[in-house]
Image (cartoon, rainbow, N blue to C red):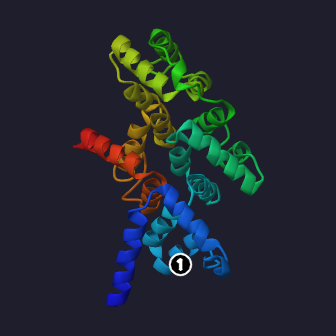
Amino acid sequence: SQSAWKDHDAIIKILSERSKYQLHHIAEVYQKPVAQGGYGGFLETRLKTMLGGPYGEFMRDCVMKTDAIDAEYVHVSLNTLGCEENILAEVLCASSTHELEIALKYYEAVLKRPLKDKIISKTTNGSPFQKLLVAILSNKRKSCFEAKKADAEGHAELLYNAGLTDKGIKRDDDAIFAFFSQESRESCQMISEAYESIYKLDLVEAILAKYRGPVAFALMLWTADLNDAIVKRIQVNITDPHVKVVGLDLRHLSHLFAKYNHRKLAAVVDNYKELFE
């Protein structure tokens, strides 16, 4: 009906013009009892139920806190038949160090179980993907201030000798994953530049020469500049020959666009235009 259409316009206007902080505050007020100026329910649940489908999920995600969004997607990925590895890669490898720490604390507080234990039980034992995520969850990334160009060439050589190359050198997953799990994004960018200068091969090409599927996707996200990592998340949901994701996954994109604020998304849009024209 015309009135329903106007309601949808109002919802879109309200949710799209507010900051993440304002949306979280609106959800908190909505949850209060009527006597205290609220409506005595969860706004995110009402939005999802009333609007339905991917549209309802996106609007619900908009008013949820980032740690709750990430934790929910991790929970969903680990409670399907098998494991949705690409979702795990997206949440764990394309987040900032702070976002990852907060999401892990939220997940473990709600579900009363360490995420690392859950991942080990749901992924193929001894697989490269499992090894990478366990390394990420077992270690902590260094501060961006610890990244030094002087160390980059030595680190590039370490990765090359560990088999991260298009040459026939045997791959040492434990060494590669243990190293990357502790390096900051800034350090990874310096190493990538040094690697290409020394070996005339892009680090991403070296990764794809040795890995395929979700583990390749995870490594690309983990080692990229954060904005570039988010762009890769968008692109892989549309088309990417190296990762088996078919078609446009609205659930993934909903999570992505609802998670970040306007400034971050504007930067991502600029990066996307630059990379994919």
Task: Determine the residue located farthest toward the left in the rendered image.
Answer: 277
Residue at image x 46%, y 29%? 210
Image quadrant occupied by the N terminus = bottom left
Image quadrant occupied by the C terminus = top left
Q: Is residue 161 above or below residue 261?
A: above
Residue at image x 46%, y 38%? 221
Tell me residue 123's x, y (percent): 64, 46
Q: Quadrant of residue 4?
A: bottom left
Q: Quadrant of residue 99?
A: top right
For residue 21, side relative to residue 204 (left or right): right
Q: Nearer the viewer, residue 103 or 171?
A: 103
Tell me residue 168's x, y (percent): 45, 18
Q: Nearer the viewer, residue 172 or 219?
A: 219
Residue at image x 39%, y 81%? 7
Q: Nearer the viewer, residue 142 or 53?
A: 142
For residue 219, side relative to residue 5 (left or right): right
Q: Is residue 121 visible?
A: yes
Q: Is residue 123 visible?
A: no
Residue at image x 64%, y 30%? 140
Q: Amino acid at mark 1?
A: Thr
Say what secondary structure mark 1 lies in.
helix
**Callout 1 environment at 10 Å: few (<14), some (14 to 19), or many (20+)?**
few
Which residue, given by chain and number where applicable, does mark 1 sit on? 49
Task: Determine the residue located farthest toward the bottom in the rendered image.
Answer: 1
Q: Is residue 118 above or below residue 187?
A: below
Q: Is residue 133 above or below residue 247?
A: above
